[in-house]
Amino acid sequence: MRIIFFIPFILISLSILGQESFYSKNYDWNRERHAWSSFWVTHPSESNVDYGVFLFRNAFELDEVPEEFEVYVSGDNRYRLFINGEEVSFGPARGSLQYWRYETLDISPYLKKGNNIIAAEVFNLGPMRPVAQFSNVTAFIFQSELLSEQLNTGVGTWKVTINRAYHARTVTSDMVLGKYYVAGPCDSIVAASYPFGWETDAFTDNDWLQPKIVQRGSGRGYMHGSPWMLVPRNIPMMEQKIVRFSSIARQSEGLDFNKVIKGAEKISIPANFKLSILIDQKQLSMGFPELFISGGLGSKIKATYSEALFDESKKKGNRNEIDGKEIYGYSDVFIPDGKMDRLFRPLWIRTFRFVQLDIETMEDPLTINDYYFKYTAYPFEEKGIFSSDNEQLTDIWQVGWRTARLCALETYMDCPYWEQLQYLGDTRIQSLISLYVAGDDRLMRNVLLTADRSRMPEGLTMARGPTFVPQITPPFSLYWVDMVHDYFMHRNDAEFIEQFLPGIEAVLGWFERRMDDNGMLGPLDWFNFSDWTPGFMCGAPAGVDDGNSALITLNFAYSLERAAELFSFFGEFQKSVKYKSMAESMVSSVYSNCYNKDRDLLADTPLMQEYSQHTNIWGILTNTFPEDQAQVVMKKILDDDSLIQTTIYFKFYLFEALKKAGLADLYLEQLGPWYDMLDEGLTTFEEGDYDDRSDCHAWGSSPLYHFMSIVGGVTPSAPGFKRVSIKPAFGKLNEIKVTIPHPEGDLSMELKKNLDNSLTGMVILPDRIKGIFEWNGKQFDLHEGKNIIGMK
């Protein structure tokens, strides 16, 4: 929060936060092994474990601005760094105490001759912090290559104070209608207590205090250890850009708030006045709302954020329908101090389609100068392209990409509003979308590392991470193994992959130790989630508690097959043979114990009381059924309504099974749930139809991957994507265009299906890449460069 004298300049300057030019080219990557010359510091007397906002300042002189001024910075929980009043960094990238990230920045573009101010806002959301946020104590660390005796925390001339303007606003059950919410508190901000201008050289800090040293900074591997094991940031800075609010859905008579959100005019609210303004952004968004006001001493401004509006029955219904609906959601409260040009901004991101401002003035009129938000997300770029002669698929693509973008920040997130947690089941789908649409594997690499480092001594990974509330979901550990294999097939990066082999052994060993005498898995501990379908007990299939779950056994066999390929590639043939043999044995055991020949389906347990799409999907994916039986079973999976049905999440595997069974042409006919969501006015894809919860859930974006891998038919046929298999499945389409950002360059194709079912067009492969094109059972060799397709 600060005084803004020239708003247009600030809006432009903030946009550079997404650039990667802050990273030093001269960084010594061995730094994490050594003691730093700076120290973690905190406030000398205030609590450093509770909710609180500390402000740090350091003034210094420069005779000349150096060409490069390299610094290292981090904070707990979070920090914002300002140079001469301008924000230059927001972090640290989220991690754990054992892998606490710091940023390496070149601040020379923000320095000037003469007096300079480096300032940092460091906040701790206390016990109510997001479950994804680790913390030791509120603290800040800054280290400089130049002027280190003055600028390094713990030895330099830093000062600190507490910003008493901020107070935690608990997100109550009533705010979120009793739904599971763990993304942190909101804020109540009292302007009269805010030290406006604190980050500029015009501010006087005579009453600020000398910080207290907490601990010497040190990297991971330092001989004496540290509560924060510092490691460099491994992802780019977030994209941040100013976005105007879209439209006003409801407002008090006589006041036109549209002019404010368009940035065209200010609006004056009279004294002793109450009003309510409902903003409809028209699509779900996330970021930092910023409200500029003047005057209004004693006024109260409440901002409520929600994904949707609710009717009298607390149902969302069509998201575009406003009449008769009310807003429910978490909220911030701002109390103006009556002064001019005040900026109110929450500490953490907010997610919303709808924002309602409830304003009550007292004796002093209030002027709203401007209101917008700073969109903040991982900087994915939409490099992949899919188009066809069906415009509805374009709508699914666009909404799916928005969903994927809003579910990625400093980690993947299951959802941006409710949890902001990186679950491995969700993340496998997200990672494939990232590879095929953005060509960006950095968040995928990050989650593979995070999961591996979260493993318990008994072998399993956490179901999610980072998280300070442990959750164990054994199938999600298997999905981590599958994700390592996905990376192996799509990226030529053997050194990175090989480090995960011990962890894979540990995960598979946990399941191996729980094998039953009949060759299936016995009783399983923890939360064996498979799908939020009504047919499962709290997401877990039959047999997980008492033993002999066919679904989890086949899930295990699927991962064993992929592990066998990995270990074979790295020359560990004995382990590869073992895992391959185990997978074949378990598949055989499931078939002999659970196959019902009268129904021509697998039961969920040998008791043959429950039947699900899920178990039979795994049967297809693991070749449990004889080859000539797979299509018959797949059609039963699609047509038999008595089976426990998959929801949006597990349809990813349903569609994988369609392709495996040779029925990929049926894929586009299965997109009914996505069309339904579009018809309901959703602008992102929801978690599932479970009592109106998340309107934006990462796994709902799976069509983006399948448009490429099933409709386009593009998949790797050799590790590292060194060879390509292209087997398109047009269904009822006549034309498709696909571009995929392959590691060696774009892979693109334009294809047309003719009336006689022949195929014409072209495929362009990157340099050094070859492959096979298949159509109607015929194959055509592909070479690098342009390939003309003409096949009957």
Image (cartoon, rainbow, N blue to C red):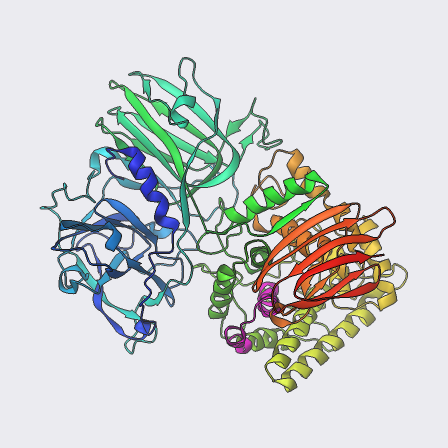
Report the magenta stretch's main SS. helix
Q: Which residues are magenta?
A: 475-502
- Is 746 located above or below residue 205 in the figure? below
- Tell me the quarter of the image containing the C terminus: bottom right
Residue 195, x across and y down, in percent: 19, 39
Above or below, 533 against 297 in this view is below
Q: Residue furthest right?
A: 598
Residue 268 shows in this picture? yes
List the single residue furthest toward the bottom.
574
Q: Quadrant of the N terminus?
A: top left
Q: Is residue 695 left or right of residue 565?
A: left
Left or right of residue 760, residue 334 in this image: left
Of 726 and 758, which appears nearest the observer?
758
Residue 61 at x, y percent in the picture: 11, 54
Residue 85, above or below 789: above
Figure label count? 0
Residues 320 and 637: in front is 320
Using the rendered view, name the quadrant where residue 679 is placed. Answer: top right
Assess whether residue 642 is covered by the magenta stretch: no
Q: Residue at x 32, y 18 (%)?
A: 269
Q: Residue 484 in magenta? A: yes
Note whether 431 is above or below 98 in the view shown: above
